[in-house]
Image (cartoon, rainbow, N blue to C red):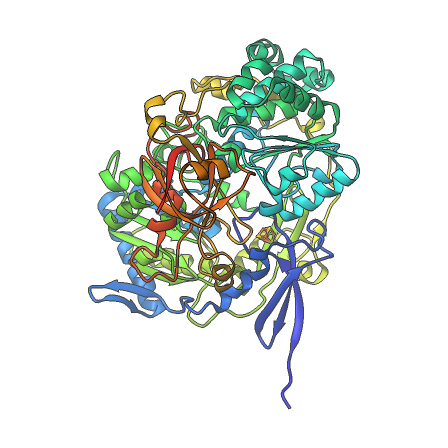
């Protein structure tokens, strides 16, 4: 008779870039994870998970999982020992650093050990993917409030809201836990307003649905400010006590009438007025703007306008509004502090690529302190303003997720050393000189702190990693240590040999040990509201900056304003004749960016990317449901399958972001065939304030193939 050891362990969803932090319960049988499901007792997610989160554990047993370091040789990739891998990594990175200087090494993504590793090397070029995500929204929030007040789990107190405003975001697909909170609020009578060019799942439940022209959300927000101010719907007490620049804003928005915005947005003036009155008159109101808002060349100003709307209606840090973050439990060292203590010198941060052009994004005075990604890619290709010769990629797939996939691939091929830390193969690891197999978060001890949900939760190790896989801390500590021994660098800023040591350091001054956190479950504290009464805001003035002194200092328009998107047919009428349609991108429930495309179950459910197209637009081109179509932009052509739906505006298309075909055994894994990013531009014009490139609202044409 065989015996089985089956037990359940509470943890947090391991899909790292997702800010939703759903609690899950894993079932482990005989040392193998066999299932994860929603944790009904988790304080915030209450049992919610999405398909990608529920199935993420399957990557542990992925048939192509890397289990041994691989080194590129003239005859192909060759398995090597970890001892050799550490030697190769330290030597090759050391050579590049000696020959071209520390700035010539860049990294993606900035996570704890990789950031510390980069700072050990003395490079500020830690690329982030937030320019592809909510970066503009975050920077706009920080300019206005000194903190981010949206996007992250529970930053919006949807559950207790009287009105929920969603702009360019579809929580039923991207943040299911928050969607449950929104539904709870609507059952209690809350109004739901959805602004999106596509009639999404959220839009179908909305009291007010605005099918806006892509890239014009800023015009809507400015006209809403106009209505709220002119109809005295604002919170005069909050404005008087806690805002700077209200009088200038009042005068400034007089030009942005609902009629003006109507001509830009394709909404009627009445819809705009009704939306403003509904938002301001049904407080407390919460707001979330995300990718559909944030990925245009005018997104920072648009996000600033919404940030101002939240402020003047007093919906900040109140029950049912948008919240400021709470500090962590006493004695628990949050990552930001660890990283703050390890910053490189100001003169070095000033040399981050793009810091001169986009000082709010890159450089010592910026919010993101990440280089400008297109500038890094250009430096790889041109050696200007200085050479970038090595890229360390961990937990990312830049070939798939950055715009202009062909250009990114070309840049990677010019590198002298590309090191990839990964679980499974991808189009990025296919180009690597050295591949280092990573242990998965479920194979090591971790912790999650949610400053908005006000909880601290353990992510305990569920199972041992495969023998040839190592933790990120283990790998990067060992490489830095070897580089110090070889005198390539002076200091290893990763003193912890593994994740357990790092965890112990983070809890060293806490009343609760990591072990106790694992055993007793999450620490939950009552959220505090109106923290600004005692502490003010973390802006230069200590108040909400409707008029941003920092933007003024850098020569940007200090009050929220509107400019037409760079890809607008109004600005480029001749190009619009050739490319008359407007291309937007979306995610599906199964995918998080390019992640999970190679998981077996995903390929079965979702084998080929679908382009949403209005039946009239399709009919004019002889396209029927299920036809293969070519999406053409000035940057090239990729393919999707047409899905006809009246949920999309006739002039707008919705493609899937970051798709590839892992089963295709070609060099490019089908990504030049299907990845819509391949036909997006990584060239200027960028958003002028923070330099993000446009991956929404791109001019295009389609045809049947
Ligand atoms: S929404 Fe999905 S991916 Fe995000 S935390 Fe929840 S289960 Fe994980």
Image quadrant containing the N terminus? bottom right
Q: Is residue 490 visible?
A: no
Q: In which quarter of the image is residue 512?
A: bottom right
In this rendering, the answer to whether 97 lies above or below 536 is below
Quick one: 475 or 605, which is closer to the camera?
605
* Picture coordinates of residue 676, whole percent (x, y): 39, 44
Q: What is the tally of numbered marks visible in this picture?
A: 0
Quick one: 286 or 600, which is closer to the camera?
600
* Picture coordinates of residue 288, whole percent (x, y): 61, 35
* Picture coordinates of residue 589, whole percent (x, y): 56, 51
Residue at the bottom extreme, as displayed: 1
From the viewer's perspective, tell me whether residue 135 is left or right of residue 88. Answer: right
Q: Residue at the location (62% across, 10% down)?
A: 247
In this rendering, the answer to whether 175 lies above or below 26 is above
Q: Residue at the location (29% across, 64% down)?
A: 71
Residue at the right extreme, as displayed: 188
Q: Quadrant of residue 205?
A: top right
From the viewer's perspective, tell me whether residue 656 is left or right of residue 167. Answer: left
Q: Can residue 93 be seen in this view?
A: yes
In this rendering, the answer to whether 695 lies above or below 458 is above
In this rendering, the answer to whether 558 lies above or below 672 is above
């Amino acid at each position: 008779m065989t015996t089985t050891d089956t037990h359940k362990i509470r943890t947090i969803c391991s899909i790292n870039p997702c800010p939703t932090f759903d609690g899950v319960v894993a079932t482990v049988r005989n040392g193998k994870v066999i299932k994860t499901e929603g944790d009904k007792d988790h304080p915030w997610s209450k049992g919610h998970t999405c398909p990608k989160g529920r199935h993420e554990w399957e990557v542990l047993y992925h048939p192509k999982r890397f289990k041994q370091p691989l080194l590129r040789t003239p005859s192909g990739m060759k398995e090597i020992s970890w001892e050799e891998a550490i030697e190769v990594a330290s030597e090759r990175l050391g050579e590049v650093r000696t020959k071209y200087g520390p700035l010539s090494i860049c990294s993606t993504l900035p996570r704890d050990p990789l950031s510390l590793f980069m700072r050990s090397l003395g490079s500020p070029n830690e690329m982030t993917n937030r320019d592809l995500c909510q970066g503009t929204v975050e920077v706009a929030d920080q300019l206005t409030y000194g903190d981010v007040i949206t996007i992250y789990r529970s930053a919006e107190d949807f559950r207790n809201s009287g009105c929920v405003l969603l702009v360019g975001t579809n929580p039923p697909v991207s943040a299911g836990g928050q969607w449950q909170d929104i539904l709870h609020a609507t059952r209690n009578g809350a109004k739901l307003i959805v602004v999106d060019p596509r009639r999404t799942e959220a839009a179908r439940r909305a009291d007010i649905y605005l099918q806006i022209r892509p890239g014009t959300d800023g015009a809507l927000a400015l006209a809403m400010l106009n209505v709220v101010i002119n109809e005295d719907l604002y919170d005069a007490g909050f404005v008087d006590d806690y805002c700077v620049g209200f009088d200038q804003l009042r005068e400034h928005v007089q030009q942005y009438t609902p009629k003006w915005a109507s001509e830009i947005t394709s909404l009627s003036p009445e819809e705009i007025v009704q939306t403003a009155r509904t938002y301001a008159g049904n407080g407390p109101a919460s707001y979330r703007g995300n990718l559909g808002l944030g990925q245009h060349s005018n997104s920072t100003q648009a996000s600033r306008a919404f940030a101002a709307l939240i402020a003047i209606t007093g919906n900040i840090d109140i029950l049912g509004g948008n919240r400021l973050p709470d500090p962590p439990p006493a004695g628990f060292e949050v990552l930001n502090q660890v990283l703050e203590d390890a910053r490189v010198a100001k003169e070095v941060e000033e040399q981050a690529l793009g810091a001169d052009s986009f000082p709010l994004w890159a450089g010592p005075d910026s919010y993101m302190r990440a280089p400008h990604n297109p500038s890094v890619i250009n430096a790889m290709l041109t050696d200007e303003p200085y050479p970038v010769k090595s890229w360390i990629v961990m937990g990312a797939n830049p070939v798939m997720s950055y715009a202009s996939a062909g250009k990114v691939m070309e840049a990677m091929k010019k590198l002298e050393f590309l090191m990839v830390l990964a679980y499974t193969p991808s189009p990025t690891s296919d180009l690597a000189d050295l591949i280092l197999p990573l242990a998965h978060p479920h194979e090591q001890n971790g912790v999650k702190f949610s400053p908005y949900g006000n909880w601290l939760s353990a992510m305990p190790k569920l199972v041992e990693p495969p023998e040839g896989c190592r933790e990120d801390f283990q790998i990067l500590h060992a490489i830095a240590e070897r580089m110090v021994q070889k005198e390539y660098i002076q200091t290893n800023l990763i003193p912890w040999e593994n994740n357990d040591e790092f965890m112990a350091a983070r809890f060293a001054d806490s009343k609760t040990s990591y072990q106790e956190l694992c055993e007793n479950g999450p620490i939950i504290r009552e959220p505090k509201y109106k923290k600004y009464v005692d502490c003010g805001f973390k802006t230069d003035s200590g108040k909400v900056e409707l008029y941003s002194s920092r933007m003024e200092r850098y020569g940007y328009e200090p009050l929220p304003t509107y400019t037409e998107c760079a890809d607008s047919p109004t600005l480029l009428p001749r190009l619009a004749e050739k490319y008359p349609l407007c291309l937007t991108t979306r995610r599906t429930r199964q995918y998080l960016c390019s992640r999970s495309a190679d998981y077996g179950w995903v390929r079965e459910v979702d084998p080929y990317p679908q382009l949403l197209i209005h039946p009239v637009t399709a009919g004019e081109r002889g396209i029927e449901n299920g036809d293969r179509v070519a999406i053409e932009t000035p940057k090239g052509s990729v393919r999707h399958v047409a899905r006809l739906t009246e949920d999309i505006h006739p002039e707008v298309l919705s493609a899937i972001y970051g798709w590839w075909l892992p089963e295709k055994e070609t060099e490019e894994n089908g990504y030049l065939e299907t990845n819509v990013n391949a036909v997006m531009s990584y060239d200027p014009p960028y958003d002028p304030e923070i330099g993000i490139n446009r991956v929404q609202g791109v001019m295009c044409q389609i045809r049947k193939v």
